[in-house]
Amino acid sequence: MKKLASLVFLVFLASCANPAFLSVLSAPPISADQAYSILRSDPEVLVIDVRSQAEFRRGHLEGAILVPHNEIPALAEELLPFKDRKVLLYCRSGMRSRMAAKHLEDLGFSNVKELAGGLASWRYGTVKD
């Protein structure tokens, strides 16, 4: 019986890590072209890079702030003042930004967008600090 319960639990955990499962939990990602258009038309968008500090240093979107996806729960109080702003999240390929979007939605953020395909899909240039 314990083996069956363990197996069921492992299947559940695997489904939580599945991108298809996560896509049900938040708004669909937007294309690089859509993100670029939003950034050009709305200077108030909060752009959050959820990659590591090393990845951020190699290049990031102009104006982006670094908040690694695994630090979002710990920084919840600091992020709450921005919950009514439009937020654009990105990572390298889209998986970490998907998890970050879910965290922010759970905190009450209502206008969260994420870059489909992450920075790998971005062709409009990046900056280095």
Image (spheres, grey):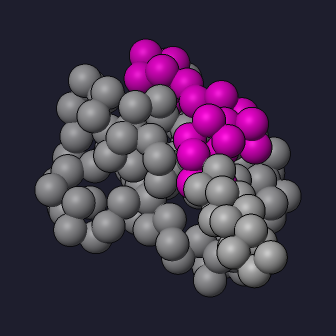
Predominant SS of the magenta segment: helix
Name which residue lies at 56% across and 41% down. 19
In the image, residue 97 lies at what x, y percent? Answer: 51, 49
The residue at the far front in this view is: 1
Q: Is residue 82 left or right of residue 48?
A: right
Q: Is residue 34 left or right of residue 3?
A: left
In the image, residue 42 lies at what x, y percent? Answer: 58, 31
Name which residue lies at 40% across and 31% down. 117
Q: What residue range appears in magenta?
A: 16-40
Q: Is residue 52 visible?
A: yes
Q: Is residue 65 visible?
A: no
- Classify the position of the C terminus by image quarter: bottom left
Q: Is residue 108 left or right of residue 69?
A: right
- Classify the position of the N terminus by image quarter: bottom right
In the image, residue 29 lies at what x, y percent? Answer: 58, 30
Name which residue lies at 80% across and 60% down. 106
Image position of 76 with respect to 9: above or below: below
Image position of 36 with respect to 21: above or below: above
In the image, residue 51 lies at what x, y percent? Answer: 36, 60
Using the rendered view, name the quadrant where residue 90 is placed.
top left
Name which residue lies at 59% across and 71% down. 72
Could you say which is closer to the camera, residue 2 or residue 53? 2
Could you say which is closer to the camera, residue 97 or residue 123? 97
Image position of 86 with respect to 122: above or below: below
